[in-house]
Amino acid sequence: QGSSMRHIQSRSSADWLWHLTACCLALGIVCCQTALAAKPRDCLKEAERYERIAERLSIKQGEDGAGYAYLDKAVDAYLCAVKQGHPEAGYPAASLVLSQRSSRDLSNEQIEILLRGAVETGVVGAMFTLADFYCDDRGKCRQPERAIDLLTRATKMGDASSAWLLGLLYEYGAGEKFKNLEKASACYELAQHLGDANAPWVLKKFHKKYGVIHSNVICY
């Protein structure tokens, strides 16, 4: 019977249900109870469900506290999903903490590890968030090379917000050696073309400060 249980746990959900039915018919209620207890936890689906609940509760007046409690549960479940082999789940976990929508306390090192894991799976939002995590709101970065590399990758994938932030880093230097006004202008223009909401007024402010820059330089 123990060997049968290990076999059940290793199969997909559909196979697990088929084997559970066969087990119940053959061995009765005790086997059913054991198999039900052994069903693997799907932390990713659990996290997404908690986020949906929190969103519904936040729409109702006076229910914000309950919504935040479910977002804490969502973070816990996303962290569980990472351990289950879903590194992309590190992005929503880190985002909820960084945005202070969750009261869960993660260290900077933990947040960086989560975002880097999600970046490795190609999550564009994680690329932007990790680059933003490396920099302040004036374009100064403690890891400028990494930030620019991440934003360049995301921009090439068509992310408008990354093009805007890349322009900001080139405008303010991300460390003085990276300052490049021609690239800044090109990135702001690309961000506007891609539909970033901040780009039009940022580009207008940029032109007022530096004038219109005519160049064949591209953003990346």
Image: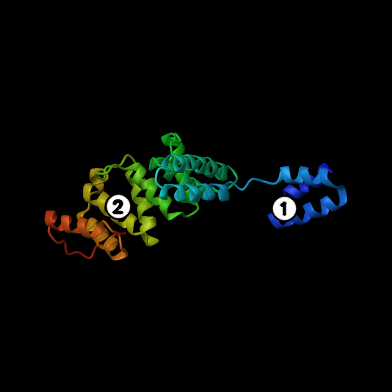
In the foreground, 217 or 131: 131
The residue depicted at 32 percent of the width and 39 percent of the height is 142
The answer for how far apart the CA atoms under marks 2 and 1 are is 44 Å
Do the residues bearing badges 2 and 1 touch, measured as CB atoms within 8 Å?
Answer: no
Q: Quadrant location of residue 41? A: top right
Residue that protrudes farthest toward the front in the picture: 61
Please state, as top left, top right, bottom left or bottom right, where the C terminus lies in the image.
bottom left
Q: Disc 2 on helix, strand or loop? A: helix
The residue depicted at 28 percent of the width and 63 percent of the height is 190
Q: Looking at the image, what colour scheme do you see?
A: rainbow
Rendered location of residue 29, percent (x, y): 82, 45
Q: Is residue 71 above or below residue 210?
A: above
Q: Disc 1 on helix, strand or loop? A: loop
How many other residues sit within 10 Å of disc 1, few (<14), some (14-19) or many (≥20)? Answer: few
| Amino acid carrying mark 2 in the image | Leu
How many other residues sit within 10 Å of disc 2, few (<14), some (14-19) or many (≥20)? Answer: many
- Label tally: 2
Precedes in sequence: disc 2 or disc 1 = 1
Q: Quadrant location of residue 198? A: bottom left
Residue of label 1:
11
Rendered location of residue 101, percent (x, y): 40, 42
| Amino acid carrying mark 1 in the image | Arg
